[in-house]
Amino acid sequence: MRTNPTVTRKTPEQLYGEPIDFRGLRHAPINEQGVVYLFGMVSRELGFSIEALQQGFPDCEGKYLYDDKKNLWAKARIEFEYKASAFKEHGHDSSQCDFVVCWINDWPDCPVDVIELKSEILKLPHK
């Protein structure tokens, strides 16, 4: 979709991501808070159990299903970012984090496991 050049370009009060219509979430995240909300909606289906959320690094502590055959769980230190590369830009220590949960994985060589929600929700029921 192209921008209409005849429209006056004042700053809108609210911006929205692309339409996704995923379980009541009409638009894709456009910031870290949207990523946190969406992860909360699907974390269990992605094999996570959340213990705590905080404002400091890492953002979230929980457990993930390490071995579903033996039902073994492991500690998960999670950092939320809109784009995975923000992890590096913020100077986070990869040895103190197990997963980066993001909307867009723009860092293919990230030293931490990346969960890109944009692709993960395509595998889940939308309703």
Image (tube, helix red, strand yellow):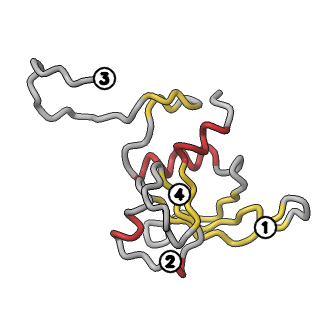
Disc 3 to disc 1, how far (Cα)? Answer: 45 Å
Under mark 2, the amino acid is Ser
In the picture provided, is 15 more to the left or to the right than 41? left
Which residue lies most toward the front here? 109
Mark 3 highlights which residue?
Answer: 1
Mark 1 secondary-structure assignment: strand
Residue at the spot x=59%, y=71% of the render? 98
Q: Earlier in the sequence, mark 3 or mark 1?
A: 3
Disc 1 to disc 4, how far (Cα)? Answer: 18 Å
Mark 1 highlights which residue?
Answer: 73
Please tell me how crowded label 4 is: few (under 14), some (14-19), or many (20+) other residues with Cα within 10 Å: many
Q: Earlier in the sequence, mark 3 or mark 4?
A: 3
Under mark 4, the amino acid is Val
Disc 4 to disc 2, how far (Cα)? Answer: 13 Å
Q: Earlier in the sequence, mark 3 or mark 2?
A: 3
Under mark 1, the amino acid is Trp
Mark 4 highlights which residue?
Answer: 101
Q: Earlier in the sequence, mark 2 or mark 1?
A: 1
Asked if labels 1 and 2 touch by Cβ distance under 8 angstroms, the answer is: no
Mark 2 highlights which residue?
Answer: 94
Residue at the spot x=48%, y=59% of the render? 80
In terms of depth relative to the viewer, which is nearer, 84 or 75? 84
Under mark 3, the amino acid is Met
